[in-house]
Amino acid sequence: MKKTTVVLIFLLGIVSFSSCEKDDICVDGDTPLLIVRFYDSQDITQTKEVPGLQVNGLIIGTDTLEILPNASLDSIVLPLRPTETNTSFLISQKLGEDDPTNFDVLTFSYEVKEEFVSRACGFVANYDALEGSATSEGDASWINEIQIITPLVENSTAAHVKIFH
């Protein structure tokens, strides 16, 4: 009788624990961000800070969304819109107090590739066939060239774009 009770309790424990399922916690389900590095146009191997850098995301029409208010950086991280096939940014630099602000519009076009990660994470948007262009919003463009390093944006660990200024 004691053996049957022990076996029954043991089987009941196995059945109750086997019905448990793993926690649905999303660990690696982030849509990647675009990493842009700024380089010196005279020495293309050296990174170069952009003084007074400001970045605004351009939304339909003339609306903007502030991404980076005012900094001197040699690299930035930009979000791309997963519901669109292109994203534009108003990017500017101001060299000094008395100098005018130079504005350029960066436009990145891409194809959105959705990838199913897990039930907890859902879908992650990766960007393929990345292309970039810059147009001047003033007298002179301060961006000389845009070079795409990696046309597939699937992680946020390495630079995808080089901008020479």
Image (tube, rainbow, N blue to C red):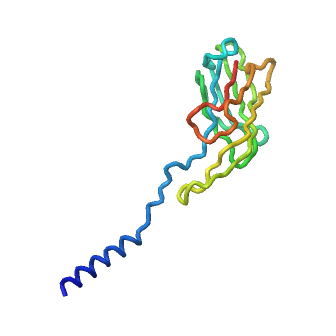
Comparing 138 with 14, the one in front is: 14
Q: Which residue sits at x=79%, y=18%?
A: 140
Q: Which residue sits at x=66%, y=51%?
A: 114
Figure quadrant of residue 122: bottom right
Relative horizontal placement of residue 27, taking residue 135 as reference (left or right): left
Relative vertical location of residue 40 with respect to residue 8 in this rendering, above or below: above
Figure quadrant of residue 165: top right
Comparing 123 with 53, the one in front is: 123
- The mark total stands at 0
Q: Which residue sits at x=23%, y=84%?
A: 4
Quadrant of the snapshot with the N terminus: bottom left
Relative vertical location of residue 94 with respect to residue 26 in this rendering, above or below: above
The single residue placed furthest to the left in the displayed view is 2
**Residue 142 appears at what percent x and percent y?**
73, 19
Figure quadrant of residue 59: top right
Relative vertical location of residue 16 with respect to residue 48 in this rendering, above or below: below
The single residue placed furthest to the bottom in the displayed view is 1
Relative horizontal placement of residue 4, taking residue 54 as reference (left or right): left
**Residue 145 appears at what percent x and percent y?**
74, 22
**Residue 30 appears at what percent x and percent y?**
56, 47
Q: Which residue sits at x=65%, y=13%?
A: 96
